[in-house]
Amino acid sequence: MKAIPGHLWLGLGTGALALGMAAGHYRAQKARQSWQASCAVAGRKKALITGASSGIGAEFARQLSALHYDLILVARRHERLERLAAQLSEANGVQVEWLPADLTQYADVERVCEHITKLSHLQLLVNNAGFGLEGRFAQSDLQRQVDMIELHVLASVRLMRAALPGMIERRFGGIINVSSLAALVALPMHASYSATKSYLHVFSMALHAELRSTGVRVQALCPGFTESEMHGPADNSRRNDLPSFLFLPASQVVRESLNALEADRGLCIPGTFYKFAGQVVRIGPVADMVTRLMASRD
Ligand SMILES: NC(=O)c1ccc[n+]([C@@H]2O[C@H](COP(=O)([O-])OP(=O)(O)OC[C@H]3O[C@@H](n4cnc5c(N)ncnc54)[C@H](OP(=O)(O)O)[C@@H]3O)[C@@H](O)[C@H]2O)c1
């Protein structure tokens, strides 16, 4: 038997690779079209936002209501949710419900999950509720550390698991998990924060790939410093320690996130400076240097 020449193998291999890539591209394109088409035919769109009582979550509520999404707002401060709900339904003619819940508490998370499974057209879930913790782990309040894991990781995972079957069945839907730039590097003094946000980042990227061609999109949103109540009032010392250009308005963060969802990008790092920083910080030696630098601060 005659041996097949090397260049023929090379040609066949390249052809197969090109075909595989074209098929992948076609599947992704189809999923994108079906997502957009579904949005159009689905009529009313609904989004559930956790941590909607302030900052980035409240801004998601504002921008999504302007895009004619009906909303379900979740957080602990119900009077804030109630006020925001009234403002948005009046301004944009959408239906806005509010669901007071402490998402560090299993029973409250279950109540929100039950609500989700009963919805017939949940288009978007935004897992945004979160808080910061600074200081040495060994001297910290253990309950706060556990609360952070409950809120950032377990509540988000439970809400996603409740939302996804319906979204997959309807072949449309999106999930935005608000992670952080702090997810991209190990941050001493913020160990639980960077670790829980890393979980959200990696989990979202994996789901984004896993759900390709189902019509459901998942995004890890990794903002740098953003103007919100997380950093306290605008005139506090923490903010004054940092150059103001580092703080992005929440409106920009949300706008870039929604644009990235439209383009089906699994990772969104808002702002040109942070996009660049996000690339650099992931280079092994740079990441090590940042970790060592942060550890040496007191
Ligand atoms: N600001 C930044 O620089 C920055 C940067 C990267 C990522 N992030 C992330 O962005 C997300 C939003 O934060 P933000 O900056 O907008 O801060 P924020 O203004 O303090 O908002 C935090 C939201 O989370 C809610 N929340 C906190 N604990 C909760 C709990 N146990 N149960 C239910 N809801 C809870 C708060 O509502 P209630 O107090 O009413 O419950 C509030 O609505 C967080 O996940 C944060 O980690 C922020």
Image (spheres, grey):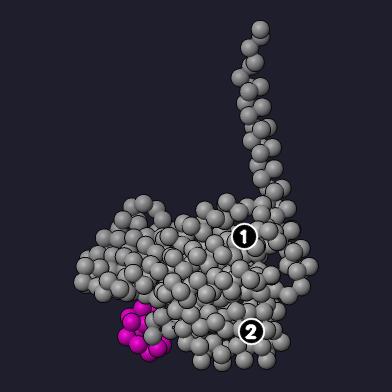
Element assignment for label 2: strand
Residue 195 x %, y %: 37, 62
User: Image point 48% across, 57% down: which residue?
Assistant: 203
Residue drawn at (54%, 74%), measured in percent from left and top? Answer: 112
Question: Count the marks: how many?
Answer: 2
Mark earlier in primary sequence (2, 1): 2
Which residues fall within the magenta stretch? 233-244
Three-letter amino acid code at disc 2? Val
Q: Is mark 2 within 8 Å of ligand 1?
A: no
Residue 174 at x, y percent in the picture: 62, 65
Residue at image point 32% right, 74% down:
144
Q: Residue furthest right?
A: 41
Give coordinates of residue 252: x percent, y percent.
55, 76
Q: Circles 2 and 1: CB distance less than 8 Å?
A: no
Q: Is residue 238 magenta?
A: yes
Q: Is residue 121 magenta?
A: no
Which residue is tagged 2? 96
Q: Is residue 108 left or right of residue 114?
A: left
Image coordinates for residue 254, horizontal then vertical, percent: 56, 74
Residue bearing the label numbered 1: 165
Residue 21 seen in the figure:
yes
Which dot marks residue 212?
A: none
| Callout 1 amino acid | Pro
Q: Is residue 282 above or below residue 129?
A: above
Q: Is residue 38 above or below residue 21?
A: below
In this rendering, position of residue 160 left or right of residue 43: left
